[in-house]
Each structure stands twice: as C-alpha cells, then as structure tokens.
Amino acid sequence: MMIEARATRRTTLNGKKYAKGRKVEMSQELFDALLPTGRFELVPAAKKTAAGKTDPSSTAAAT
Amino acid sequence: MAVFTSAGAKVLLIKAPPATFDAAGYTALKATAIEVGEVSDLGDTPSRVYDVVPWRNISNRGESKAKGGYTLGSQTITVGIDPDDAGQDLVDAATEDDDPYSVIISHPRLGDICSRALVMGGPKSYGDVNTVATRQITLEHTIVSQDEDGLVYIPPA
C-alpha cells in the first residue's frame, strides 16, 4: 500500500534529496522503517466532498 | 579471473527481520531498507569464524586442536557525517535500541550479504582542516536462533 508522506526536514533518503515539506509517495513499510528517524510525517488524506452524499434517512430522523 | 573493489556497494539497514531467513526473505526486505549514506569503508563483512580450542597433555607436550564455537564477527563501517542522511539517523536510533537490526551489504558484482546485527554506535571524528568529519559505526553480527545464523548470501543477478 502506498501512502503520502511529507519530509519534516531536508533529507537524503536512499540517495535522493528531499527539501523540507516535500511530499513523497512511499510504501507503508518504508514509512514504518523511517519512523524512528522522525524525518517523515503522514500527510492526512484529503476530505471527501459531502455535496449530494447526505443520507436522507438520517436527516429525517434528526428532524 | 576477476577481482573487484567495493565501488558501488551499499549498506542498508532496517529494524524489521525478514519473514524468512533466506534469499527470498531478505530480497523482499531490501525494498524497504534504508541506505546508510556516505559510507567510505565497509570493514569486515560477516562470516563464520570458529574459535580454536587447544589441548596439551603433559606426557608428550604436543598441542592438539579442536574447533570450538563460532562468531559471525563484528564490522566497523566508516561514514562521512551527513546530518541530512536518513540512514545515519536510523543508525542513531538503532544505537539506542537493544534489538538487532537487519543489515544488507549490497555489492553490484559480488552480491548481497545479509544478517542481523546489534548496532553499537561509534565515535565521531571531526579531524583537522583537511579531513572530512567521519564516524566509525560498529555492527555486532549475531545469530538469530539456536537453529540458524540468519546469515544469508544472495549471489548477483
């Protein structure tokens, strides 16, 4: 599984240089291996738009 | 006949053990291992070295020898200090850790030597004005169980 991570500081990883704040796509396993270094943080997944996706039954129950 | 230098070799480190202590296990692990950057000297790679056990009886004075236990040895690698390098950061974390880490010494022509090792850390040397600041890191290679070394050699493709 691939995840999106962000460099918390300027980092050289496996020969590639990443500026601070640069987003990097990497495997979950690689991210886990890097956790002790604190050099990458998980980028939160973008929120899905809710327009037209509301559940009518829950709306009715609330009213 | 051909001989090779260490040019192109890499040291890879990761805390996780392989799923299996064989070529397939370490090959899978290699995909997520982290390279220790700026290595300038690999030192002695792990290998079984047996102790010699001598015995002399007093009647004829001669010494007979037997093979005793073995060690996978220790390895001291030299790196140029790079504060940006994630691999060197992982070495720092591993030094604080009592658990062994997986180490893969990957050579483009000689193949991969894989083992589990305790990362013991090592002194930094800033040297003089004409010297690159370096650090010597000691790895103590260890067996993984009473049944197996965990030392795996993967020939080059």
Image: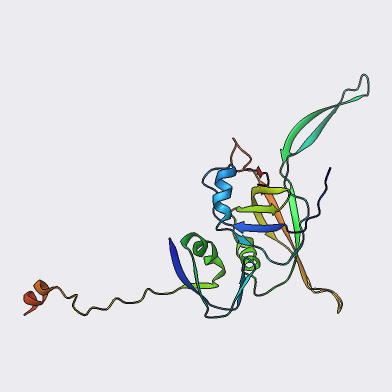
Q: Residue at left 74%, top 46%? A: B73
Q: Residue at left 57%, top 69%? A: A37
Residue B21, quarter of the rendered image: top right
On the image, the x and y values in percent for residue A14 come to 62, 65
On-image quarter of the N terminus of chain A? bottom left
Relative to B93, say whether B53 is above or below.
above
B103 relative to B46 in the view: left or right: left
A18 relative to B62 in the view: left or right: left
On-image quarter of the C terminus of chain A? bottom left
Relative to B134, say whether B26 is above or below.
above
Compare residues B102 and A52 and report the one nearer the observer: A52
Residue A4, quarter of the rendered image: bottom left
Compare residues B109 and B98 and report the one nearer the observer: B109
On the image, the x and y values in percent for residue B140 come to 69, 51
- Please count the marks in the image: 0
> Is residue B41 something one can see in this rendering?
yes
Q: Residue at left 14%, top 73%? A: A55
B35 relative to B17 in the view: left or right: right
Q: Residue at left 10%, top 74%? A: A56
Compare residues B73 and A21 and report the one nearer the observer: A21
Compare residues B81 and B64 and report the one nearer the observer: B81
> Is residue B17 something one can see in this rendering?
no
- Indicate how the structure is coloured in the image: rainbow
On the image, the x and y values in percent for residue B28 come to 54, 50
